[in-house]
Amino acid sequence: MTAGDVVHLTTAASVQFLRPIFVRVIRELPERHTYDGWVWIEGYELNAAGDAVARRELYVMRAGVRFQALPVKPTRPTRPAKRRRRSVRVG
């Protein structure tokens, strides 16, 4: 896993994810010793809109991590910026 990857964590990754979550990975934490096949990651938990809501450190089974595309945010039409007119003095 590399920085920017979005992963879906379910009970396949760890029993702590009874409620599956999406996480945007910041980095793996290789300095923490783990059992074979497990890894510590640091990342941001994402809400349904794809916005980061909490920074987390998670202990997961690498084989249970599912890589995902970024959740698509609904887009709103943008309005053109209002232009402010300035008065001009003549003469």
Image (cartoon, rainbow, N blue to C red):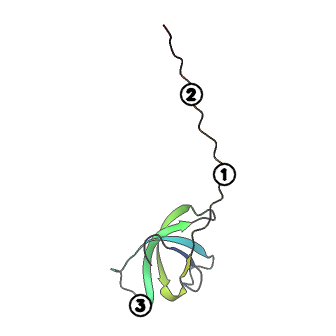
Quadrant assignment for the N terminus: bottom left
Q: Which residue has dot 1 on it?
A: 76
> Does residue 38 appear to the left or right of 73 in the view shown?
left
Q: CA distance from mark 1 to mark 3?
A: 46 Å
Tell me the element at label 3.
loop
Q: Residues within 10 Å of mark 3 (few under 14, many from 20)?
A: few
Tell me the element at label 2.
loop
1 or 77, nearer to the observer: 77
Q: Which residue has dot 2 on it?
A: 84
Q: Earlier in the sequence, mark 1 or mark 2?
A: 1
Q: Residues within 10 Å of mark 1 (few under 14, many from 20)?
A: few
Tell me the element at label 1.
loop
Q: Earlier in the sequence, mark 1 or mark 3?
A: 3
Q: Is residue 91 above or below residue 37?
A: above
Residue 4 in picture, x, y percent from top left: 47, 69
Residue 61 in picture, x, y percent from top left: 49, 86
Q: Which mark is residue 28?
A: none
